[in-house]
Amino acid sequence: MDEKRAVARPHRVEVAIAGGGLTGLALAAALGRAGTCLALVEQAPLASLVEPEYDGRVTAVARGSQRFLASLGAWPAIAPEAEPILEIVVREAGSPVGVHYDHREVGNEPLGWIVPNRTLRLALQTTIADLTDLDLFTPARIVAAETGTGGLRLELADGRAIETALLAVCEGRLSPTRELLGIGDRRFDYRQLAIVCTLRHERPHRGRAVERFFPDGPFAILPMRGRRSSIVWALEAEKAAAVRALDDRAFAAEVEERFGDLLGGIEIEGPRFYFPLVLVESERITAPRVALVGDAARGIHPIAGQGWNLALRDVAALAEVVEERLRLGLDPGDASALDRYAAWRSFDGLALVSICHGIERLFSNDVGPLKLLRNLGLGLVERLPPAKRFFMRHAMGLVGELPRSMRSARSA
């Protein structure tokens, strides 16, 4: 893939995408397959984003998201590294009460898949590699944006320019382009670090994901291929600093203390990664000629593993809006198109922000009455099969007004 395709004059495209991470790549793949003329602007060389040391995280890919990735042609490259989630167990530490979700209660398909982020990036980069109507501007960054009567002019730091009908901002929760455009945001600092690493363990996980809630933050173990799992441990920043100083042997002992011996002996595989946890919610998800997508619109707590699934619903919805407008010979970035996107995606985003933030706040304390309330709630869900099935279908991304590419039963 030629990452520095020379452009001698302002380049005119139908859609420009700011950000070449998972969300930006998925949007480029979706629009590119429909023949949209695109520009992708990314601050880092794309090759650096798939280096093993860049990102050790994994992503929970819901059923609806898997359908979308299959529609892009990306799933065959992802599937060999995708571990099916067959069960999810949610419990408060020290309590016998919990909820057990089993995929067999809602059909034969897995509840989702756990996939390394690097695998997703490689597959999506491969998917866009042969798009003839895509120009890559990387490494590059947007330093100015000016709205005109027929579109948006983007100035890059190296002097190049792009003229576009629509700018899709996919840079993540701390998006510099969102700030450049003057779109404000609201933030809540959880004062936690997410500790992420891969474990190799003695016993098979059998496709079971486990989330345990502690007063100082949630702790999740997510199944990966083979006898391996990923942990996502959200821990108070002060305690996280102490844990960060531990060597691998002592760290593994801390993990066993939290999780128990269900997986037998464990050892750390590869480096540990640390990410500060901050809720960021944009004041709005559109502006003239601009749509915010994924974490640039709202970056949520990873407590439910729904962040990228929410982003992919943005991607699929925006791609559908743009494709329909272009097919009818209409402007893909005018007010009508943006109003449709905002109306479609605002409620889903607001609901997940509220749900994930509420769960984190409810469980991250040791207050007696709240602890009783939590256990009553978990016990009630466990005893109500219709409620369990609804929550499972919601987690699978099969609830609400879904884009066509996520409603399709087709998979690879």
Image (cartoon, rainbow, N blue to C red):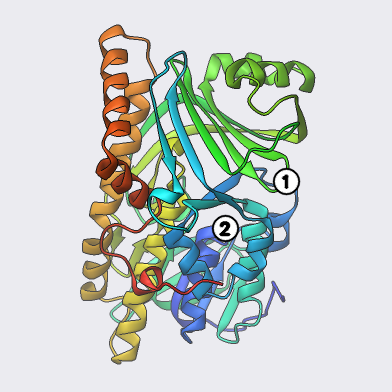
Tell me what residue is drawn at x 23 percent, y 69 percent: 340
| Circle 2: element type | loop
Quadrant for residue 313, please give it: bottom left
Query: Where is 132 relative to 409, above or below?
Result: below
| Circle 1: element type | loop
Q: Position of residue 254 (x, y in %)?
A: 66, 16
**Residue type beneath disc 2:** Gly
Quadrant for residue 360, please give it: top left
| Residue mark closest to the camera, 2 vs 1 | 1
Of callouts 2 and 1, the N-terminal one: 2
Quadrant for residue 25, please give it: bottom right
Which quadrant, please, contains the N terminus? bottom right
Q: Position of residue 118 (x, y in %)?
A: 67, 54
- The residue pinned by badge 1 equals 226
Tell me what residue is drawn at x 34 percent, y 30 percent: 359
Query: Where is 216 relative to 9, above or below?
Result: above
Give the distance between the C-alpha atoms of the residues marked 2 and 1, in whole angstroms: 27 Å
Query: For this view, does 306 lie left or right of residue 1?
Result: left
Which quadrant, please, contains the C terminus? bottom right
**Residue type beneath disc 1:** Gly
Tell me what residue is drawn at x 75 percent, y 31 percent: 202
Q: Residue 21 carries which label?
A: 2
Q: Residue 244 carries which label?
A: none
Tell me what residue is drawn at x 58 percent, y 69 percent: 159
